[in-house]
Image (cartoon, grey):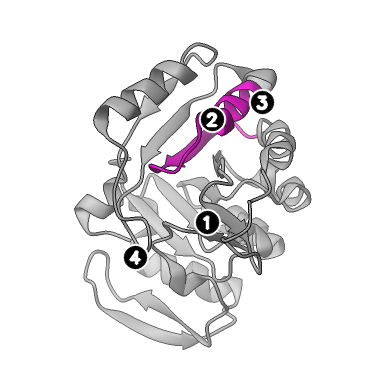
Amino acid sequence: MGVPTLFVRFGRCDLRCRWCDSRHTWKSAPECRFELARGSGRFRTQQNPVEVDDAVAAAEVLELSAHRFVSLTGGEPLLQPEAVAALARELGARGPRIHLETHGLAVEALEQVVDAVHVVSMDWKLASDVRREGEAFHAPGQPFDAEHQRFLEVARRAPEVVVKVVVTPASLAAELDEMCRRIAAVDASLPVVVQPVTPCGPVRQSPAPEHLLGIVARLSRELSDVRLVPQTHKSSGVL
């Protein structure tokens, strides 16, 4: 947060989060956009799929080496692990650290790319607000905890790992407790970022401040590095 970062956004996602602010990435798109100059807000379009060489060239136009990080985000990047691995190696070789932003469920795909990235930033999805693609919200959601724990065990092979959990008024104490227990079983010292939702779509409000402080205190009983951080990309207007 707060350092120069170049974003590479992958299309498609196999989850449906009530609060998602990038719903245009859920499905494959016929075209993508490349920014023409760093921070310009002007773009050119190109047909998908994009070759790795084309993506690297576009990053060079945006002063790749001036960035501290390249964020591989989505959608869900690990639905395309070969492309993630290739881009991570090509872009990382030019200076920036590679930051993988992922929903934290694609364990086998992570195995293919973890040695090429510097930071794994994984979400811990709460079933109160997240469903798999094709599942309805009117039925109870199935928890993701066991898959997340396996993912986290692999992610620790990267130099840095951060766990992020988006909380809403619907988030349940029991699911936060289970998340906490499973993270502590892997490594209680890992940074865990509690991110209050910014209202979006059907999610109309953020949790109250006193509720957020209670969540941080609750998680801090077992985890040593719990941080409360808002969704800064929303306040800055950068998506």
Under mark 2, the amino acid is Leu
Whole-number angstrom distance, CA of label 4 to CA of label 3: 40 Å
Q: Which residue is mark 2?
A: 176
Under mark 3, the amino acid is Arg
Compared with residue 119, is residue 53 higher up or lower down, i.e. above or below? below
User: Label 3's element?
Assistant: helix
Q: Position of residue 120 (x, y in %)?
A: 57, 40
Mark 3 surroundings: few (<14), some (14-19) or many (≥20) residues within 10 A: some
Q: Specify whether 108 is left or right of 222.
A: right
> Looking at the image, is mark 1 or mark 3 nearer the viewer?
3
Residue found 48% across the figure and 25% down from its top:
191
Whole-number angstrom distance, CA of label 1 to CA of label 3: 33 Å
Mark 2 surroundings: few (<14), some (14-19) or many (≥20) residues within 10 A: some
Whole-number angstrom distance, CA of label 2 to CA of label 4: 40 Å
Residue found 45% across the figure and 47% down from its top:
96
Residue 94, magenta (yes or no): no
Mark 1 surroundings: few (<14), some (14-19) or many (≥20) residues within 10 A: many
Q: Which residue is mark 1?
A: 91
Magenta region, residue range: 158-183
Whole-number angstrom distance, CA of label 1 to CA of label 4: 12 Å
Q: Are marks 1 and 4 in contact (CB under 8 Å)?
A: no
User: Label 1's element?
Assistant: helix
User: Label 4's element?
Assistant: loop
